[in-house]
Image (cartoon, coloured by chain):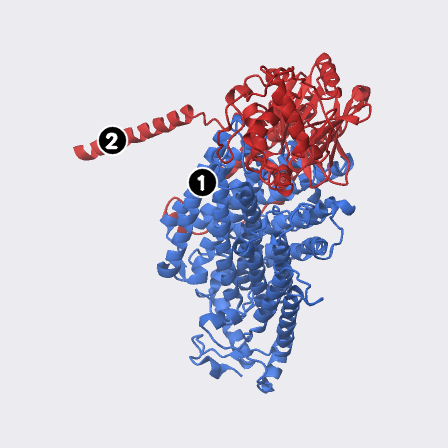
Chain colours: A blue, B red
């Protein structure tokens, strides 16, 4: 396969097509244009990370406002409407604009390196995913700067509260179109990752040798591809209701609000695993590295991940135990939900098995990873409590649920992502975060997080419903709310320390040699930061922890690499994809079309061709133009020829055909 | 040497003092968040449905706690035991590269499944028990229909029919017979709401175009707090209600009173209208409408509301009665027997006998009632009455407000 691919490209190079004036091929390596036109998975991953962290801070700020409003009974920090906007945007932002893209940042940056590839399968599609994600994020947040305000329908957007009758302005339209764009971005990215993992693995990297993080990337990508269509359908139906007066959810004309809930949660529950599986993958990389042992029970961990993915599609109605589904359906979903606890528990057992008998180095990534295991365990146990439907009838939509999913999403996903940032930072930027500041931020975040969310279990059992902007002083909720707000401020300080240290390290941190953690997977065999072509020679994989094996068999590997280098050079050097502006253009078209559909009032004064239709059509044309040019500009790429020390020639263009 | 020892001891005393101060702060300010005995507690329950749900919760709690202690214990032990204490240990020759043990894995999977079976059995029992009234109690069941609106609750009593006006209808305070199963049919017209009285039963959603129901029972007479539990727009947080459970005799009396038309207070010849209270003070944004003394004996307070207020001024009440129609209140609210037959707002036929106003939000007294009708939007953001004032250009002078308050308070 590899050889066929290579020789095909080699043949093409020999007959390089004539330069066309129609298709502009950007070659900038620095500056704005280089970022807008990049197809390098590492740069794209970096951008995903930057955007995700920005929105993470925005979502965190929204959370602090929410907590300040609830610090005392009858709070006056926010009005009811502002509060409702805050929790809607906090949920939407954290899930779709912070945790998902931060996971995507790691998929992009780390996964191709882990499988020994030089890029993802479709580099330009990757850029398109990134820019479409940015377009979606802009649309969702546009309301902040408009008269209509940001969306306030809750992150689940339950019909019919989102219908034209109850939400007449454009804020819900922006929420709908923003999520649609994010769906396009996520599905495109996921297809790309699936094809990459299936097809671009280095020789010898069998499926059962894939690093666990890559496995979890694959499973997550399948979950996205299979679950996002459901929310796409739901959003299309809602959009039709709002724009064209259809009656999917319009109650007065016989619409069924419950249909929205089913469609939303058939997406929404797998979404939970979309958020947590990458985190589990990261932790499954960090624990072995810092225990200096292979992952305990690798096949079972992988199989558990896959079965969580499968079962994740059969439990959605546990979000709907109170909608009156009847005894049989409630019982079925209750038992299916309990069943999910088994593969999840298995993962925890295996992580502990990994620590057992190891030499545990207590470095910052390891602290966050262990914090993850503890917090995820607590979140998992409260999840089991929810699975018991009768108990859930009391817990549903109370602060007990808030406590549960923040233990899973902060204590789980976020801790793992913060661990991942610390872990891969030296590889990404060649610098290492100070252990002191890293550990300090961990302890502050850990303390703040628990002070905030542990009391919420009690608050929920004491009857406080979620999504409430105020409460009276006589209900016994004052103490827990006050403590939670203090905790949230501490958590905020912790996050601030974390990011301040991260920015400092990025600019001025201690420079480190490659493989600073004595790690086990292939990406650590690269110099840091990795060159744009990643691997000078596509590695051959001999064992599951590939780089660990290579370190044990240095001579053999060196011999093998030298031979392969010669063979590759004879094939015309390292094949690289060209930069392209057209993915960005296509995303821009989507952005314009979404603005047309969601933001502009329909003004039918010049007949059918109002401003709304006009702007939407322009967006569509720009998008189609972007896609056509992208298809027609070709994908021949160019070749890099490295000298014997592995450096690319100074003048890059000289190396290009 | 001496200086450093002094510093150490100072530091030690400082720490001790800080710890003591923190403790005092915690004790003094009543920061015992773990007490779960509030009005909406799911732990101190008062009926069989909530009790059954609590029992299932306790099973899940104990099972997961035991697992947490076991697994957490092993995790803590492994972390401490196998931790590299020195740099040399970190760099030591790596441990034996074991890949797992299928027997341990299978054993743990088996144990997890067993733990889940322990949870599953009471769960299944609970699902069937809490779903509907048990067969042997069906004959004794009292039926009620509850409808959620943005942002209040309507309660209908199909078994209490009133000639000429259908089933007995009240708002925001659900009165039920204690000791009997009550089947509540939950409905919604606008958006989704959820019916939740934590001490009596877990919630069931009120969904438009979908007929849901739940059952509950209060073991003893009592006064219970309820709240909408599904986000339903601006004022979701202040969409509350109360359940009042009465002994069979009290309940029968209450039904008799409620099924009669609104109370009439006829002014004596020559009586003049006098304001009964001081003019309206200003309220802070989101100010609580509940006083501390309200909490001491809410059921007794509710019972006291069933009798006419002291010092009623019949002439003022008559003014208010006329204003209720002329200011178009009557086009949204029903006052049976007084020519007011609106249906889009709560039925006010016996509003004076309720303990709370604005859907369980503020106490039903003259001051709060005037606050409510003076500026409904300030009490309950986005509500229909505020919009109605704007749409119909309703303006109330302080004198109007006082008269309306006197009238509404007289409706026992």
Give above or below for A50 relative to B92: below
At which x and y percent is residue B144?
75, 26
From the viewer's side, name the closer residue of A423 and A43: A43
Residue at image coords 48%, 43%: A65
Residue at image coords 53%, 72%: A37
Total marks drawn? Answer: 2
The answer to whether residue A560 is seen in the rendering is no
- Circle 2/circle 1 CB separation < 8 Å: no
- Secondary element under disc 1, as helix, strand or loop, is helix
From the viewer's side, name the closer residue of A284 and B22: B22
Q: Which residue is mark 1?
A: A448
Q: Which residue is mark 2?
A: B10
The answer to whether residue A22 is seen in the rendering is yes
From the viewer's side, name the closer residue of B152 and B339: B339
**Alpha carbon separation for disc pair 2 and 1:** 28 Å
Chain of the residue that carries numbered disc 2 in the rendered image: B
From the viewer's side, name the closer residue of A343 and A569: A343
At which x and y percent is residue B157?
76, 25
At which x and y percent is residue A212?
57, 54
């Amino acid at each position: 396969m590899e050889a066929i691919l290579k020789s095909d490209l080699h043949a093409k190079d020999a007959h390089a097509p004539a330069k066309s004036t129609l298709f502009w091929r950007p070659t900038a390596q620095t500056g704005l244009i280089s970022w807008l036109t990049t197809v390098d998975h590492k740069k794209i991953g970096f951008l995903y990370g930057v955007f995700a962290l920005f929105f993470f801070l925005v979502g965190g700020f929204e959370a602090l406002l929410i907590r300040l409003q609830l610090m005392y009974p009858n709070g006056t920090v926010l009005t009811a409407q502002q509060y409702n906007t805050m929790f809607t945007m906090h949920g939407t932002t954290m899930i779709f604009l912070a945790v998902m893209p931060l996971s995507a940042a790691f998929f992009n940056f780390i996964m191709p390196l882990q499988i020994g590839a030089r890029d993802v399968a479709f580099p330009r599609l990757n850029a398109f995913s990134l820019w479409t994600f940015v377009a979606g994020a802009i649309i969702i947040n546009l309301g902040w700067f408009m008269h209509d305000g940001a969306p306030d329908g809750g992150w689940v957007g339950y019909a019919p509260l989102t219908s034209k009758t109850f939400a007449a302005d454009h804020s819900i339209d922006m929420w709908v179109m923003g999520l649609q764009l994010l769906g396009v971005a996520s599905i495109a990215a996921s297809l790309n990752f699936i094809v990459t993992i299936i097809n671009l693995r280095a020789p010898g990297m069998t499926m059962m040798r894939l690093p666990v993080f890559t496995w979890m990337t694959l499973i997550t990508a399948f979950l996205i591809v299979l679950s996002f269509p459901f929310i796409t359908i739901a959003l299309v139906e809602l959009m039709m209701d709002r724009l064209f007066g259809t009656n999917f959810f319009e109650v007065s004309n016989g619409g069924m609000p419950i249909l929205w809930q089913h469609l939303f949660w058939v997406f929404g529950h797998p979404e939970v695993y979309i958020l947590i599986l990458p985190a589990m993958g990261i932790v499954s990389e960090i624990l072995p590295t810092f225990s200096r042992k292979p992952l305990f029970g690798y096949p079972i961990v992988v199989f558990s991940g896959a079965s969580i993915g499968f079962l994740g599609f059969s439990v959605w109605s546990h979000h709907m135990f109170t909608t009156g589904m009847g005894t049989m359906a409630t019982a079925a979903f209750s038992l299916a939900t309990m069943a999910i606890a088994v593969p999840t528990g298995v993962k925890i057992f295996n992580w502990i098995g990994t620590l057992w008998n190891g030499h545990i180095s207590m470095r910052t990534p390891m602290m966050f990873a262990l914090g993850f295991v503890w917090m995820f365990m607590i979140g998992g146990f409260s999840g089991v409590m929810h699975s018991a439907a009768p108990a859930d009838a009391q817990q549903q939509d109370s602060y007990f649920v808030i406590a549960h999913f923040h233990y899973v999403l902060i204590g789980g996903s976020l801790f793992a992502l913060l661990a991942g940032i610390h872990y891969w930072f030296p590889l990404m930027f060649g610098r290492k975060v100070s252990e002191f500041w890293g550990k300090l931020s961990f302890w502050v975040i850990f303390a703040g997080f628990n002070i905030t969310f542990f009391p919420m279990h009690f608050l929920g059992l004491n009857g406080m419903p979620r999504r409430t902007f105020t409460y009276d002083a006589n209900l016994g909720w004052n103490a827990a709310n006050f403590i939670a707000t203090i905790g949230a401020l501490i958590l905020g300080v912790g996050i601030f320390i974390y990011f301040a240290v991260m920015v400092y390290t990025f600019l001025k941190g201690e420079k480190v040699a490659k493989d600073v953690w004595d790690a086990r997977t292939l990406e650590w065999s690269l110099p840091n930061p990795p060159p744009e072509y990643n691997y000078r020679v596509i590695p051959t994989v001999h064992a599951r922890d590939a780089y660990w094996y290579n370190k044990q068999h240095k001579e053999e590997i060196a011999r093998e690499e030298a031979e392969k280098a010669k063979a590759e050079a004879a094939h015309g050097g390292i094949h690289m994809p060209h930069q392209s502006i057209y993915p960005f253009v296509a995303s821009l078209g989507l952005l314009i079309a979404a603005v047309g559909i969601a933001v502009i009032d329909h003004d039918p004064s010049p007949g059918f061709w109002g401003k709304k239709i006009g702007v939407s059509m322009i967006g569509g044309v720009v998008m189609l133009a972007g896609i056509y040019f992208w298809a027609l500009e070709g994908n021949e790429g160019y070749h890099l020829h490295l000298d014997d020390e592995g450096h690319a020639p100074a003048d890059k263009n000289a190396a290009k055909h | 040497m001496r200086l450093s020892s002094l510093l150490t001891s100072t530091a030690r005393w400082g720490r001790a003092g800080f710890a003591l101060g923190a403790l005092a702060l915690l004790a003094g300010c009543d920061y015992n968040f773990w007490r779960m005995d509030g009005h909406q507690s799911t732990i101190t329950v008062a009926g069989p449905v909530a009790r059954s749900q609590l029992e299932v919760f306790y099973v899940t709690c104990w099972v997961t706690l035991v697992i947490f202690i076991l697994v957490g214990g092993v995790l803590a032990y492994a972390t401490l035991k196998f931790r590299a204490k020195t740099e040399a240990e970190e760099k030591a020759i790596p441990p034996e590269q074991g890949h797992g043990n299928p027997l341990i894995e299978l054993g743990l999977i088996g144990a997890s499944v067993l733990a889940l079976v322990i949870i599953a059995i009471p769960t299944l029992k609970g699902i069937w028990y809490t779903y509907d009234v048990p067969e042997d109690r069906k004959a004794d069941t009292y039926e009620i229909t509850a409808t959620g609106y943005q942002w209040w609750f309507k309660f209908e009593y199909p078994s209490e029919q009133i000639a000429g006006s259908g089933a007995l209808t009240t708002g925001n305070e659900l009165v039920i017979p204690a000791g009997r199963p009550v089947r509540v049919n939950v409905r919604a017209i606008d958006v989704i709401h959820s019916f939740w009285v934590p001490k009596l039963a877990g919630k069931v959603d009120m969904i438009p175009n979908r007929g849901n129901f739940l059952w509950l029972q209060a073991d003893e007479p009592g006064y219970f707090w309820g709240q909408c539990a599904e986000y339903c727009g601006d004022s979701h947080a202040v969409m509350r209600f109360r359940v009042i459970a009465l002994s069979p005799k009290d309940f029968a009396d209450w039904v008799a009173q409620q099924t009669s038309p609104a109370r009439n207070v006829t002014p004596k010849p020559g009586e003049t209208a006098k304001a009964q209270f001081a003019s309206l003070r200003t309220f802070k944004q989101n100010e609580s409408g509940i006083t501390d003394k309200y909490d001491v004996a809410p059921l007794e307070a509710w019972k006291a509301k069933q009798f006419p207020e002291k010092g009623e001024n019949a002439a003022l009440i008559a003014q208010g009665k006329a204003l209720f129609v002329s200011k178009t209140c009557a086009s949204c609210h029903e006052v049976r027997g007084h020519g007011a037959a609106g249906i889009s707002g709560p039925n006010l036929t016996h509003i004076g006998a309720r303990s709370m106003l604005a859907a369980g939000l503020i106490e039903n007294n003259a001051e709060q009632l005037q606050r409510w009708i003076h500026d409904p939007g300030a009490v309950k953001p986005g509500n229909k009455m505020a919009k109605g004032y704007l749409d119909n250009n309703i303006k109330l002078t302080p004198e109007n407000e006082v008269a309306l308050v006197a009238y509404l308070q007289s409706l026992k």
